[in-house]
Image: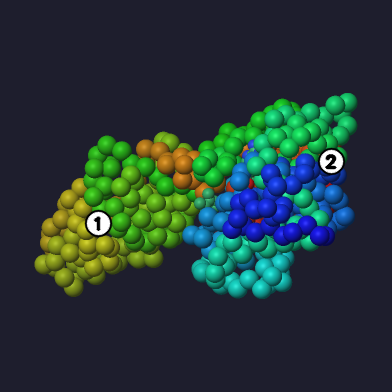
Amino acid sequence: CSRPVLTCDTPVRKGAGVTPDLPPPSDADVVVLGAGAAGLMCAITAGGRGRRVLVLDHANKVGKKILMSGGGRCNFTNTGTTPENFLSANPHFCKSALARYTPADFIAMVERHRIAWHEKELGQLFCNDSSKQIVRMLLEEAAAVGADVRTHCSIDAIERPDEGRFRLHTRLGTIECESLVVATGGLSIPSMGATGFGYELARKFGHALLPTRAGLVPLTLSGKHLDRLQDLSGVAFEVEARCNGASFRNSLLLTHRGVSGPAILQISSFWQPGDELRLDLLPGHDLPGWLGAQQRDRPAAELRTVLGDVLPRRFAQRLCEAWLPSRPMRQYTPTQLRQVADLLGAWPLVASGTEGYRTAEVTLGGVDTAGLSSSTMMSRHVPGLYFIGEVVDVTGWLGGYNFQWAWASGHAAGLVA
Ligand code: FDA
């Protein structure tokens, strides 16, 4: 293909292949809406089969969420990906696509492009250098198969006259296509171009939607719960967060609005207002045994001093002001010591809400998988219409799973669209 390769550094550059520098795009076999992770992977796969592919995005550059992901280093996959790492009303739906495009497949692409990477923890793979390398790689792959990627292209209306080809009325003109792939993502970070367009389109074509809400998001506190902790903003420690049968052991960060950190982001996807949320403040400790030993070995030490040796001192102090009476260890009866152990092992965190889509990494819910084929992502109602990536009701845990779903679902649709 003679089309110049786009770069992710320059949103609009003469000859770089992005609108408005090029003539209007022509009709295509496949139009992909959304040049994010899922859309670009779908374009690469469909283009590789010889399909004429056009990718349209309303934003000024492609892959914005890839660029901002992983603190600028993109946690592009997780080597431990299994269907159990995803939330969906149908937990079986993601199995087929994930099995047919694995983390090893994506790693192979990354290595072909000589992008250096490392494992941070728990199978999470990051670029050594920059997320830009992943966007550049995807754009190079798309250019290599002749996919036409256009930015600055809003879609005004989509119709399917006589139940045949799709007709799109766009800022770049009217375009017709045989297959239409919706990869417009979720609602999180509206300032980065997120819209509810994919959901509206799904509804228009007769698809059911499951309620959407922010996931992988900091939780907020209010009233006395916030007053007690607000001035400890910046304090972090390891906890095990538990809610609705899920549990995650990782760090918690106190913020000026509530709580964040990986353990909280993970559990936020399982929490809804009113649900009970408990934190083990000393995970891995045999709390009754440990407290008993402290009482034996340090009878004159106050509880807050003992706790300050294993928790951040300021948090231990606050815990003993607001939740636990602090006195010398020798003064606790066995029953009282048991109560202390119970509270430390299942501390109730009363969250008032989440920080919402403004800071959420993902959107839970979305296009109901009951209306889609799990092997192709094609609509069961409208032949030739596909939904991939985050717009679908499949949401991964924190740790590279959401990109793996984007790659896998994009690949599945690209094989047939
Ligand atoms: P994505 O959002 O990537 O792309 C959708 C595209 O559609 C966008 O380019 C958008 O402009 C376009 N679009 C939207 N509406 C449109 C319209 N009306 N018309 C035309 N185009 C439209 N995941 C992970 O696995 N590892 C990580 O490190 C991170 N880190 C991370 C950090 C932050 C801050 C966020 C917000 C998210 C993450 N994620 C993540 C989640 C991950 O970014 C997300 O799940 C994927 O990008 C989803 O890929 P999609 O292609 O489905 O949507």
Where does the N terminus fall, quadrant-wise? bottom right
Please report the residue visible at 14 percent of the width from the left and 66 percent of the height from the top.
Answer: 301
In the rendered structure, the answer to whether residue 320 lies left or right of residue 393 reads left
Q: Which residue is mark 2?
A: 27
- Residue in front for this viewpoint, 182 or 241: 182
| Alpha carbon distance from label 1 to label 2 | 62 Å
Expressed as whole percent of the image width and height from the top left, the position of residue 406 reads 66, 52
- Residue 306, image quadrant: bottom left
- Residue in front for this viewpoint, 43 or 170: 170
Expressed as whole percent of the image width and height from the top left, the position of residue 352 reads 37, 38
Expressed as whole percent of the image width and height from the top left, the position of residue 159 reads 79, 28
Please report the residue visible at 61 percent of the width from the left and 64 percent of the height from the top.
Answer: 133
Q: Which residue is mark 1?
A: 315
- Residue in front for this viewpoint, 204 or 104: 204
Please report the residue visible at 57 percent of the width from the left and 41 percent of the height from the top.
Answer: 194
Is any atom of residue 400 visible in this view? no
Please report the residue visible at 64 percent of the width from the left and 34 percent of the height from the top.
Answer: 197
Looking at numbered disc 2 in the image, what kind of residue is underneath it? Answer: Asp
Few, some or many residues within 10 Å of mark 2 (<14, 14–19, 20+): some
Looking at numbered disc 1 in the image, what kind of residue is underneath it? Answer: Phe
Specify the farthest residue to the front.
Answer: 14
Q: Earlier in the sequence, mark 1 or mark 2?
A: 2
